Amino acid sequence: MKKLLTYTIAIAALISCRTAIDIELPQTDSKLVLNSYQSTDSVWVFYLSASLMANSQDSLEFVKNGTITIKGDDGSSDEINGSQSTVKYQIGTYWDEFSQQLVTDTFGRRIYEQYIGTTTPKSGVTYSIEAKAPGYVTVSTEVTFPTPVPVNGVDTGTTLSEGWKAAKVDVRFTDPAGDSNYYDMKFHYVTYTPVYDSINQTFDLAENRARAYYYPIETSFFDFSAFQGFDDGTFDGQTIEKSYAGELYYLQNPYDSLIPAYFITELRTTTVDYYLYKRSVALFDQSKGSPFAQPVQIYTNIKNGYGVVAPYTAYLDTLDL
Amino acid sequence: MVNQLTHWVLLVACLCTTTVSAQKFTISGFVDDNANGEKLIGTNIYDEASFKGTSTNVYGFYSLTLPKGDYTIVYSFVGYEDKKVPVSLTSDTSINIEMGMGMSLDEFEVTASAGERVEERTQMSTISVPIKQIEKLPALLGETDVLKALQLLPGIQSGNEGSSGIYVRGGGPDQNLILLDGVPVYNASHLFGFFSVFNADALNSVELIKGGFPAHYGGRLSSVIDIRMKEGNMKEFHGKGAVGLISSKLTLEGPIVKNKASFIVSARRTYIDILARPAIKYGFKREGVDGVAGYYFTDLNGKVNWKISDKDRIFLSSYWGDDNFYLRTEDSYDVTSTQTITDKQDAGLRWGNITTALRYNRVISKKLFANLTATYSRYNFTIGSGFETISDPKDDDLDELFRFDYKSGIYDWTGRVDFDFIPTPNHYIKFGMGDIYHTFTPGVTVFEAGSKDDNGIDTTYGSNSIFAHEYFAYVEDDFKIGTRLKMNLGIHYSGFLKGKTHYYSFQPRAAVRFMVTENMSVKASYAEMQQYIHLLTNAGIGLPTDLWVPSTENVLPEESQQIAGGLAQTFRDQFEISVEGYYKWMQNLLEYKEGSSFFSTNADWEDQLEFGKGWSYGGEVFLQKKTGKTTGWIGYTLSWTMREFENLNFGKPYPYRYDRRHDFSIVVAHEFSEKFDIAATWVYGTGNAVSLPTERYMRAGTSPYPQELEHFQERNGYRMRAYHRLDFGVNFHKQKKYWKRTWSFGTYNMYNRANPFFLQYETEYVYNAETQQYVEQRQLTQYSLFPIIPYVSYRFEF
């Protein structure tokens, strides 16, 4: 399919005339972009950057000298002046076909520019958040953290998914009746690698945490999207079981039971802002670069700016492997 | 609903009342071309003294009822010599007329009706285009194209550069009922929309209606394009053909039984794939593989016409068309000294139409004409690719197979009966009914993977076939009140039945014309339309991958209401001018959801839809010169077209992609002599509305590297550059001993205007001499399709 598409576009490109043109786009001032996927399990963490014109040659940059204030309707408050540079190394876990096992590797040096608060948000509280920086219009938003919905149970097994033998995970939970509720489902695979400490002459266990990309079993494999969000429109107030399928090895302990391994189901109770933003970003990723797809307008809940403050609460179900 | 129907039927019935105060008799019959026996549709027939008259219908039949007495009946058809027949009317009389060519048909002409002046017709927003005039227009690559000619008329817009898509008064491409001999054609495009499927050599007439729809049409919101095939020369065997840059065609016609039965068959095929094959194979060979790629289209029209008696006729017509884009490669190599692997790849995109119509005409009485029609129409397309690895000697671990095919289509079986009832010269009544049995296959994916001989994956998913009935009935009367006022009132009833889902509607239609002076009239019309089948089309490049889908429990029928008003005038007997304004409301329109395209292989197409409304309004001016050595027209449209969908553009109204504020066209033809004539067209249009990102920013997430998102301020909020181009052509005719030949030379886009095809942002790496580094440079790039393109073609007739 891609090859056919490539040839089609190549032929069109060959017979077409390509011209770089100067376009007078409507001039707009650079706006603040405030981003945060925030749970009640950690202190406030934000990313602040600035937008650019689409035809600008500059690179996107973080805004490091801003101020972010948070005020809760429970009287709590927090203020963050300036970002902190945190150095981290990327840890990647991948399946090695040759050795038939998961391999963890450390690479890359990353500098995260984060606005890190000192307080932790709470469920049920509404927070007013404002970000300002010299030379930019102040942006703001208001979010409420939902009450986490617990997982009633998780069953695992195998299934035949479009001809492939795949792992199957059934997740049960009960949706609170009444208001519209939004959810996101994530799966994690935690294993440990024995590491020898030659100084102390001891063995330690290094944790490897990987995302297990499972997809809803009723969708096609070819429509797999990283966003597993959904709302309760079809099951409001009911107990529901959602089934997912994915790679088998995420349900297997590579060291049998000698060293612990876990399969973690994370049910996120989110908000409409989280849902709409992530859905629009997923659609954007799927369609980017395709001349056949409809344009996607990214959702934002930031007044006078862009980005999203997307609150959620998480319930974790841990399965020993 | 029943009361509404009752009121309309009673109104029509009252207006049909005739009081017989004198004995009346009817003259009826058929009007043919004396050279070939073709029906002359729209011939004006009238009493020379009183001007009471009628016109022939699409089968060349007429009926004129007058009081007993002596008359001179005039038969008049543009381009033919008027015939005057003295009639002593003492009983019902059959008079069949054969008319001969009078004025040269090389005179360029677009008329509101072949026999009536524009101000005389009740119907507004209707234009007939003679095929002979279309053949004179300069054309892309020399290919005469009926739909491209229609795009030169006011109120009609083309889509993208080179596209045969028709957008009428703000409507979408699926809102046009395109009929070939009464059979709907679902995809009227070859070569991704650059040419239409209609071979002009096989056609007799083209009529376009863009508003004030008469009640006998229904099922689409925005236009009716009624294309009639020739019937074949009843008297002599003839042929014509053409050899062009990319295709050739041949048409043969003649009598099967002289003056009783005739046939016409017309075929066309491109051959650019054959000509380019050696070069393409050489290109693949240089890459080390055996391969071939190409594209062709072909179409075949055929018709048989049998005049059983003066009262009975049978027609059988058929069209078959096929587009095929293919790619095949094969690569063999040795993996060891004893084992060879062969990799085979193929990819293809194929689509096509088949239409067939069987028609029976019966003159039931002098005043009543019936037409029974059974038709079949099929459109489908397939896109697929495959990859296969074959080992020799066979090794199951090395053999692989992967195949992906996506198919979609629509199939119709139709039966209908139509009556023309002409009780008096003041009334022309039409009524009829019919049913269409639809079969939809909106999108089925077949996926196969693994080794050929073992149990790999072999699965089919997507929408199952959907079956539905679309039925209709109508009645209308075109009648005169006094000498100045003429009206056409009618009602079209239609319904759609799919499983337990049933939709139906009564659609009133009204048109009125008032003669202000002898040469000027004012007109107004109102029409409600309903559409039960829909086309899901991609926002970007037009491809035949658009899906035809039905109304369902979740997908309501589209509806429209349109009012129009205007005036029409003929002056100096050469110029016709019409000025019209319109307003159209549309509901239950469909669009793909954000990010969706037909490539989204979700389980169900219904999940990919958004529903909304639209409105369009504007004015059109049309000035044409009909006679003389120099003929042509000027058309101008000023219009606005908007859409509003709750989940698109954040619920705010936005311009339709083909919202074109100004649309202007000039068409001129001049005949220097019988041997030499020229024609030129110049078109201008405001650029299409597109969605362009205006800003970019970082996305949320924990990655430290800025991953970008693009911000679209407004859907379709930006205008591409204006579109304009000049085409020019010359024709040299020569009568040889046994045939007539024409050399045509011309140029498409004479001043090489780079008209936009699509826009996108691209990143290039540009060397910076100061920093001596390659830096990323982001720029908006416009792709244009057709530069200046000369053409030459050779046509012959015998």
Image: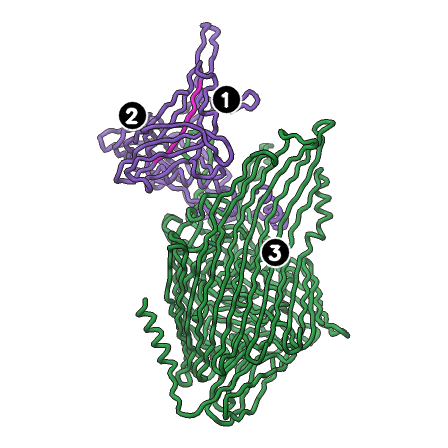
Chain colours: A purple, B green
Residue A14 versus residue B497: which sits nearer the camera?
B497
Q: Is residue B631 magenta?
A: no
Which quadrant of the figure contains the N terminus of chain B? bottom left
The structure residue drawn at horizontal position 58% and vertical position 53%, both measured from the top left corner, is B351
On the same chain, marks 1 and 3? The answer is no
Report x, y in % for residue B384: 58, 45
Task: Kindly report which numbered mark, 2 or 1, lies closer to the viewer in this rendering.
Answer: 1
Label drawn at residue A119: 2
Report x, y in % for residue B532: 43, 59
Which quadrant of the figure contains the C terminus of chain B? bottom right
Amino acid at dot 3: Asp
Q: Which residue is mark 3?
A: B322
Mark 2 or 1, nearer chain start: 1
Task: Kindly report which numbered mark, 3 or 2, lies closer to the viewer in this rendering.
Answer: 3
Label 2 – label 1 distance at C-alpha: 37 Å
The image quarter in which residue B787 lies: bottom right
Are the residues flagged by discs 2 and 1 in contact, CB closer than 8 Å?
Answer: no
Residue A58 versus residue A276: which sits nearer the camera?
A276
Name above or below for residue B79 compared with residue B609. below
Name above or below for residue B347 compared with residue B797. above
Report x, y in % for residue B511: 41, 74
The region drawn magenta spans: A183-191
Indicate the secondary structure of the residue bearing disc 1: strand
Q: Chain of mark 3?
A: B
Amino acid at dot 2: Thr
Q: Which residue is mark 1?
A: A102
Prevalent SS, magenta region: strand
